[in-house]
Image (spheres, helix red, strand yellow):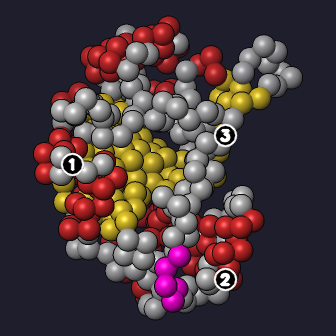
């Protein structure tokens, strides 16, 4: 995307006022999120053993940060890239039942991320997962869950407005559902990112469904690992972000693979070697609960609600010195 500098940008809040607003958003959102979604907060790992197969390779090309550990000779330890598979194992081990779920504060390092206004090498998000019945593995369950999350985000907008009326971004009244196939048919000559921008600009907020499966042109709308989301029952929540003139992804989520969809997707992705990993063996044997889950970016949500031009204004991370300098010259102080 490259660095975008909005004209005459005004953050409205000082750094200290911004920090106070960030704390308020994070504290309030996770309480409401847990209550509305019937989720319990639990502790989650920062790293896992590579041999378990619990880490995620996201789009299939990102390299996890790895290191050795004295207590585990010969084992490769990886910093988590997301907790999608770990959460599902936790739901089984902790005895969660249908309708019950968990959320965590997930921190990750994305070493291959291209840094810009929206992307950081440090990821902080609420990772959540919920047990559903096999009969609930359908589009209606997915849409109902998305509407609930959208409602919580909208309510947070009003909460922030009461405290900082000049700093808050006003969000659309509703969320629109569209599939990646429908976007391809509507905009056949556009790139996936251009399609996202066009449809999100039109509706304000979109849930883009069915990501990972190949489209008519032989390519998926975007990459998705084959072993957590069911590619027919997943999607991204996108908000139109006027400040940067682009769609802003707040959440990636979906109903997770069952035995059948995992079997099919591993073959389609050329990842049949994963069948021998402990997690995948359990799933293929039907030993894990059916679940729905995803992640909601904490800094992305703060950026959206406070109408900030760069994620570094609401998140402390590493940024190239030239980026810091240019941003500071344009009222964007990167933490």
Q: Secondary structure at mark 3?
A: loop
Measured along the vertical axis of the image, is residue 45 above or below residue 310? above
Q: Mark 2, residues whose alpha carbon is within 10 Å: few (<14), some, or many (≥20)?
A: few
Dominant secondary structure, magenta? loop
**Which quadrant, please, contains the C terminus?**
bottom right
Tell me the residue that label 1 is attached to. 189
Q: Secondary structure at mark 1?
A: loop
Q: Is residue 245 magenta?
A: no
Task: Tell me the distance, in whole angstroms, between the alpha carbons under discs 1 and 2.
Answer: 38 Å
Percent position of residue 162, x then y: 43, 88
In the image, 176 versus 33, the foreground residue is 176
- In the image, 32: left or right of 3? left
The residue that appears at 29% across and 16% down in the rendered structure is 264
Percent position of residue 268, x then y: 32, 18
Closer to the chain start, of discs 3 and 1, is 3
Q: Residue furthest right?
A: 70
Task: Tell me the distance, in whole angstroms, between the alpha carbons under discs 2 and 3.
Answer: 35 Å
Tell me the residue that label 2 is attached to. 329
The residue that appears at 20% across and 68% down in the rendered structure is 202
Percent position of residue 125, x then y: 53, 53
Measured along the vertical axis of the image, is residue 255 above or below residue 172? above
Tell me the residue that label 3 is attached to. 46
Q: Give the magenta range.
A: 5-9
Task: Tell me the distance, in whole angstroms, between the alpha carbons under discs 3 and 1.
Answer: 41 Å
Closer to the chain start, of discs 1 and 2, is 1
The answer to the question of whether label 1 and label 2 lie on touching residues, with beta carbons closer than 8 A, is no
Q: Is residue 7 magenta?
A: yes
| Observer able to see residue 34 | no
Q: Mark 3, residues whose alpha carbon is within 10 Å: few (<14), some, or many (≥20)?
A: some
In the image, 58 versus 168, the foreground residue is 58
């Amino acid at each position: 995307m490259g660095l975008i500098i909005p004209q005459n940008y005004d953050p409205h809040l000082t750094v200290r006022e911004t920090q106070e607003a960030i704390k308020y958003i994070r504290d309030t959102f996770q309480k409401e999120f847990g209550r509305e979604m019937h989720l319990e907060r639990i502790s989650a790992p920062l790293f896992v053993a590579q041999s378990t197969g619990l880490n995620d390779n996201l789009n299939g090309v990102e390299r996890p940060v790895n290191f050795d550990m004295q207590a585990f000779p010969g084992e490769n330890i990886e910093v988590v890239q997301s907790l999608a598979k770990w959460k599902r194992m936790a739901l089984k081990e902790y005895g969660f039942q249908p309708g019950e779920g968990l959320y965590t504060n997930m921190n990750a390092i994305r070493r291959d991320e291209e840094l810009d206004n929206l992307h950081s090498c440090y990821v902080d998000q609420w990772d959540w997962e919920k047990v559903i019945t096999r009969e609930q593995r359908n589009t209606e369950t997915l849409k109902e869950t998305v509407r609930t999350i959208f409602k919580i985000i909208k309510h947070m907008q009003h909460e922030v407005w009461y405290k900082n009326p000049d700093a808050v971004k006003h969000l659309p009244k509703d969320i629109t559902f569209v599939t990646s196939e429908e976007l391809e048919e509507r905009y056949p000559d556009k790139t996936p990112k251009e399609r996202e921008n066009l449809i999100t600009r039109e509706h304000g907020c979109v849930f883009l469904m069915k990501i990972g499966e190949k489209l008519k042109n032989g390519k998926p709308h975007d990459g998705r690992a084959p072993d957590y989301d069911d590619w027919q029952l997943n999607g991204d929540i996108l908000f139109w972000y006027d400040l940067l003139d682009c769609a802003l992804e707040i959440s990636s989520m979906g109903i997770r693979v069952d035995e059948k969809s995992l079997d099919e997707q591993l073959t389609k992705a050329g990842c049949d070697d994963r069948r021998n990993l402990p997690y995948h063996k359990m799933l293929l044997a039907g030993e894990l609960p059916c679940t729905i889950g995803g992640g909601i970016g904490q800094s992305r949500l703060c950026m959206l609600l406070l109408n900030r031009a760069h994620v570094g204004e609401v998140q402390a991370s590493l940024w190239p010195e030239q980026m810091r300098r240019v941003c500071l010259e344009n009222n964007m102080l990167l933490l």
